[in-house]
Amino acid sequence: MKATGWSTHPSEHLKPNQISFEDGEAYIARKDIINIFTDGSKTEHGVGAAFCVLTNDSRAYQWYAKLNENNTVFQAELTALHEAVIYASHLPNHNTSKIHVDNRASIMASSNSKSTNETARKIFKILLSNPRIKVS
């Protein structure tokens, strides 16, 4: 479904520190941040999306799904990011989450309030109301 008109008010923007194209490796060692890693892929075996949460160097939670064969890698990457953002938005408010994404196009689409991609707009809206969630 394509966006018609403004999906959010033009004055609404994400916090400057919410989106980064820098390598998030510096955050991984920090114990005060919940690190979430996403991935989407398409192979001869199918299309899938996943994320995992690492706490103190151990996997605390994981989510994965097999998607329709017609989905693209971009759609798989966005699906993984969307599910990770939903997960992070349900964490206690005192927790800061860093979502590590290996697909720059997903980050760019999700940080654009005028994205034509419905999933990217959903991610943007969740990030807008949860400034403690960071994406890089």
Image (cartoon, rainbow, N blue to C red):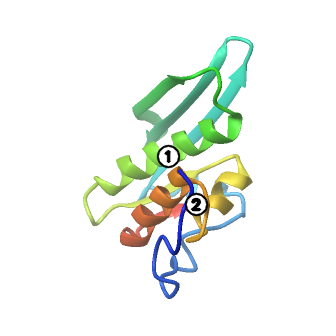
The residue located at (65%, 52%) in the rendering is: 106
Q: Mark 1 highlights which residue?
A: 36
Extreme left residue here? 92
- Dot 2 alpha-carbon crowd within 10 angstroms: few under 14, some 14 to 19, many 20 or more: many
Residue 102 higher or lower than 62, as above or below: below
Residue 98 higher or lower than 44, as above or below: below
Residue 20 higher or lower than 63, as above or below: below
Residue 83 higher or lower than 12, as above or below: above
Q: Which mark is residue 114?
A: none
Determine whether, in the image, residue 41 is placed left or right of residue 133: right
Calculate the distance from the C-alpha at mark 1 to the C-alpha at mark 2. Answer: 16 Å
User: What is the total number of numbered labels drawn onto the structure image?
Assistant: 2
The residue lying toward the viewer, choosing from 29 and 49, is: 49
Residue 12 image point, x, y percent: 47, 82
The residue located at (40%, 62%) in the rendering is: 126
Q: Which quadrant would residue 109 be assigned to in this image?
A: bottom right
At label 1, which amino acid type do we have?
A: Ile
Residue 97 image point, x, y percent: 44, 58
The residue located at (37%, 68%) in the rendering is: 130
Is residue 55 visible in this depiction of the protein?
A: yes
Determine whether, in the image, residue 37 is placed left or right of residue 103: left
**Kind of element beneath mark 1:** strand
Q: Mark 2 highlights which residue?
A: 110
Residue 8 image point, x, y percent: 46, 75
Determine whether, in the image, residue 91 is placed left or right of residue 31: left
**Kind of element beneath mark 2:** helix
At label 2, which amino acid type do we have?
A: Ser
The quarter of the rendered structure image containing the C terminus is bottom right
Residue 43 image point, x, y percent: 73, 19
